Amino acid sequence: MREITPAEVADRPLVDVREQQEWDAGHAVDAIHIPMSEVVARLSEVPDGAAVICRSGARSAQVVAYLEQQGLDAVNVAGGTLAWAQAGRPMVGTVA
């Protein structure tokens, strides 16, 4: 599984796999919200080449492993939304 930093996300589509209440509290601008619990059912909505993010990088790593098994190109965002916010990347709301 490949990991990238928030700065390396660049033009990759960003998929946030946190649950609804986490998303509502704060998320990256332009992220696509597909909770981890819905990834299997919504697989067709996950863009190939996605950078996958959660709060710290643990859940998103699991999702990336699954996506790779399905033949999709995906990378994990190291440090998750916590690292994203600390890097000063654009956010809607805040991440606790």
Image: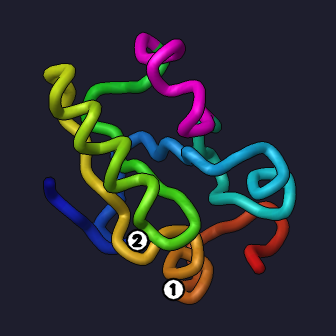
| As drawn, 10 above or below 39 | below
Quadrant showing the N terminus:
bottom left
Q: Which of 11 and 75 is in front in this view?
A: 75
Q: In the image, is residue 35 part of the stretch drawn in magenta?
A: yes
What residue is disc 2 on?
6
Spatial CA distance of label 2 from label 1 is: 7 Å
Residue at 42% over, 17% down = 43
State which quadrant residue 59 falls in.
Answer: bottom left
What residue lies at 58% left-to-right and 67% top-to-bottom?
A: 55
Work out whether 30 lies above or below 83: above
**Which amino acid type is shown beneath numbered disc 1?**
Ala
Q: Is residue 38 left or right of residue 94?
A: left
**Circle 1 SS class:** loop
Q: Percent from the top left, x then y, of residue 14?
A: 47, 46
Q: How many marks?
A: 2
Q: What element carries label 2?
A: helix
Earlier sequence position, callout 2 versus callout 1: 2
**Could you tell me the amino acid type at mark 2?**
Pro
Tell me if label 2 and label 1 are in contact, CB under 8 Å. Answer: yes
Does residue 70 appear left or right of residue 76 in this picture?
A: left
Eyeballing the image, is 89 above or below 49? below
Place of residue 21 in the rendered image (x, y in percent of width and height, measured from the top left): 84, 52
Neighbour class for label 2 at 10 Å: few (<14), some, many (≥20)? many
- What residue is at 41 percent from the left and 53 percent from the top? 60
Q: Residue at x 62, y 45 (%)?
A: 30
Q: Does the magenta stretch include residue 85?
A: no
Of residues 90 and 95, the one drawn nearer to the viewer in this rendering: 95
Which label was assigned to residue 87?
Answer: 1
> Which residues, given as a range, are shown in magenta?
34-44
